[in-house]
Every structure is written in structure tokens, then in C-alpha cells.
Image (cartoon, helix red, strand yellow):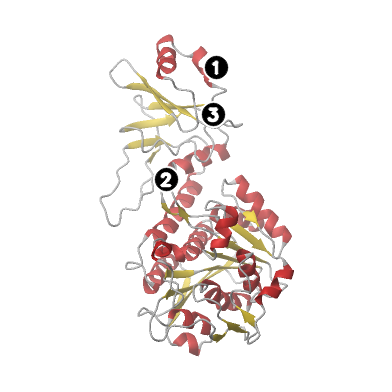
Amino acid sequence: MSFRFVAKATPKSIPLTPVSAATLPGWLKGAETRAARWVRDSGFKADAGAVCFVPGGDGGFERVLFGVAESAAPGGGLWDLAPLPALLPKGRYYLDAALAPEAATRAATGWAFAHYSFDKFREKTVFRAELVWPEGADRDEVIRLAEATALARDLINRPANDLGPAELAAAAEDLAKSYKAKFSVIAGEALLAENFPMIHAVGRAADRAPRLIDLRWGKKSHPKVTIVGKGVIFDSGGLDLKPASAMLMMKKDMGGSAQALALAKLVMDAKLPVRLRVLVPAVENAVSGNAFRPMDILSSRKGLTVEVGNTDAEGRLVLADALTEADSETPDMILDFSTLTGAARVALGTDLPALFSNDDVLAADLLEAGLAEDDPLWRLPLHKPYKAMLKSPNADLSSTGSGPYAGAITAALFLEHFVSPGTRWAHVDLMAWNLKSNPGRPEGGEAMGIRAFYKMLRKRYS
């Protein structure tokens, strides 16, 4: 996709001037009388996201002022430029601010994010303004982040009739081909033969066969990083059927797999020195005569038996088999993403993913990276006493626990059973969806946490 960057300004290029409420008075003092009067009379206060077009003498305009939040580097925030692509008329623009390279990269990244639109089933959105690359911006990094974010958004936004388990596998295979990665799939009844019984159980009722997607990349001598993503392409709730209102966004229940593939793209494109593996259990949680039932007892790849408390808590079942396989190779770390619980949304809202980890250093690195990248996470505890809530009188584990409280924590504790205590592990429970549009973040599927994880990986392995 095009992010409307150009290499050089022309004599007719128009400056984009970032101002905050604190810096606007100084700008007005230094400006020409005509321009200053126009800005004052327009009522422009330099609120974040506000724009003021300053007219020129030729009937056009000579400058665009845009409001930014108070910061040490106005114009260098991630979302500072994001409102502009949808507002600016056709023309070539340049950023009229001296920015440090990191700030220039962030500003350009926000501009690129704002060019995303999901147009597969409608007329394509056209953006007409061009931006001269801000001086010092890391162009490769900007494009890398924008393309990975677009990949995640595209996958989540595709409706389930257009993106089933096979199509999700095809998207992963396309990604593998782009970076010369190895790719394989275990599908249908072969899941039983290869001992992935819970992935099979959750997906067997659909007329589209369940599968485990497996992507491998990198040198064997490098530290092994394995990413797991929940790929439930649509969740009806199974026999514990969701109400209609709760199904409206269930095409996004594969949002964890979208994050996993987007993060993999970042890692491979940046050529990080890691041995990468991506595992995605891709299923549809449907209803038919062979659907799994509440109180069924399932075998797992790990050998633990699991009593099904609710068929609408299927994501943890497919993740458990995938985590067991990830753990079998003793990687340096396992990172998993999933749209797992409504409880995490109740606790933290829709914009803030919940982070769980068995490693304090890894968790601290991710929280720090999230703040630095404007991609925040919030850590919730793996509170050990709550493990008692997962006891079952009939099996090794209950899938859902014995009470209505701490749902995100008990789900994470359930998954922890399938990761060895010595394996460094981080689990993210996320929304993967914007409920409303903001500049650079349109309503719909969203990449959440991948910039934080990518920054952590770059810091740790570069």
C-alpha cells in the first residue's frame, strides 16, 4: 500500500508547522501580521489534532498549523501527524520542525498509519497529500511498522466468509514465502494423528477443517523465539451459543493470530538474529452434531485431561496444545497473543491489553517498551492461589474455573499449565479492535502490543 511519502520538497511545497498551546503565542509573535491575524481570528488554540490553514496570496494557502500535545519534541509524537492525511488537499507538504531522528521516525510512522483503510469490499479510499520524508527519519523502520500494522488490521477486518482457517493459513504461507521461511500445516484428522486433540475438538464441528499453522525462520544457531497466536476465525460460542449481539465482532476472534503474524513480519523484515517459530491454531468454533460439549473431558497434547466448563471458552483449549508444542523445543522465550477473555476488557477497557508473564525482567522490558512506543500494556498477576479455581473432580483441570471472578487471571493460569516453569513466557489478552475511529486508528481491527514486543526483541537480540 502507498503511504504517500516523497523524497524532496519543491518550491511550491507547503510547510506543516506543529504548535502546542504553550508554543502558539511565540509563533504568533514571529509570524507576519496577516498570518497572525488570520490564526487569531480563526479561533485556533493549538489543541491536539486541531488544524489551521493559513491562506496565501495566490488563492491557495501558504502554511498549515496543526496542534500537538505538550511534549519535549512537538511534531515528533506518534499521532501528531495522523489527523492530516484525511484533511489535507492535494499537494506536497513538509514538516517545518527540527526533530531528533527518533522523533522524526515516530512522526512519519503516524502519518503512514493514517493511510490505512480496509477497502477490499468497497471503493478504495484516496489520500491526495504527499509528505516529504522528515529529515532523519528511519525510512525502512517506518515502512516496516506501517506494513506490519496493515497486515494485522487487514486480517482482522476480513469477514469470516472471506477468511477461514484455510485462508488464514494461505496468508501465513504468503508471509513465509516473502521472507523465505519454512511453512507447514497440519489439518483435519491429521491433528489427531499428530496429537493435537484439543485443536481438533474445538474445530471439528465446522465444515472448514481446523489446522495448526507452523512457520519457521532464521539460523539454528540463534536464540529461539516462538510466537503463538489464537486463530479462532469465528466464535459462535459453540453449544454454549453466544447471544447475537456478542457475535457481531467475533470475526476478530482470530486477532491473536494477526498480532503473531504481524510481529513475525517485523522480526523477519528487520532481520533480527533470532530463530523464529510461529504457531497458529486456526479453527472455527461452530455448532453441529459432532461439536464438543460442556462437561466433555478432552485429552491435551501435554497429557493433561481438561473438563470443558463452557464451549465459549475455546481459545484457551487450542492455545494449550500450541503452547505445549512451542514449549517442547525449550525456546529462549514464548510469546502468545489472544482475544481470550471479556474479563480483561472489564478490568482494563478495550484499548489496554493485559500482560501476564512468569518472568519479571521480561514483563518489565515489555512495559517499558510499550510506554516508549505509545503501545502500552498493563501487567496483571499470575496469582497462584487462584489455581485452586481450576480444579475439577473429574479431570486434571477445568477449562473455566469454579467462579465468576478473576476470569482473565484464571485463563492465564490455565495456559501456564502448558508452559514449563523454566521457560520464559509472556501472554497478552487483547481486544484487537478499535470501537471508534481516532486519527491513525480507524474503527475496526487493530494491531495491539506488537510495537512493544518488537522493540523489546530488538533491544534484547540486536
Q: The residue tagged with tag 1: helix, strand or loop?
A: helix
Q: Who's the residue at 56% across and 78% down the image? A: 309
Disc 1 to disc 2: CB gap under 8 Å? no
Q: Are marks 1 and 3 in contact (CB under 8 Å)?
A: no
Q: Which residue is mark 1?
A: 26
Mark nearer the N terminus (2 vs 3): 3
Q: Residues within 10 Å of mark 2 (few under 14, many from 20)?
A: few
Query: Looking at the picture, does residue 26 appear above or below residue 447?
Result: above
The residue closer to the viewer here, 173 or 74, is: 74
Question: What is the crowding at mark 1: few (fewer than 14 residues within 10 Å), some, or many (at least 20)?
Answer: few
Q: CA distance from mark 1 to mark 2?
A: 32 Å
Mark 1 vs mark 2: give the one in front.
2
Q: Quadrant of the C terminus?
A: bottom right
First of labels 1, 2 by sequence position: 1
Q: Is residue 13 left or right of residue 320?
A: left
Residue at the disc numbered 3: 98
Dot 2: element: loop
Pointer 2 residue: 437
Q: CA distance from mark 1 to mark 3?
A: 16 Å
Give me the residue at 72% from left, 72% from top.
Answer: 422
Q: Are marks 2 and 3 in contact (CB under 8 Å)?
A: no
Q: Is 177 located above or below residue 287 in the figure?
A: above
Residue type at numbered disc 1 = Gly
Specify the quadrant of the image occupied by residue 88: top left
The amino acid type found where label 2 is placed reads Ser
Judging depth in this view, the residue of 104 and 363 nearest the camera is 363
Location of residue 204 in the rendering, given as x and y in whole percent from the top left corner: 42, 82
Task: Please state which amino acid type lies under the numbered disc 3.
Answer: Ala
Q: Report helix, strand or loop for mark 3.
A: loop
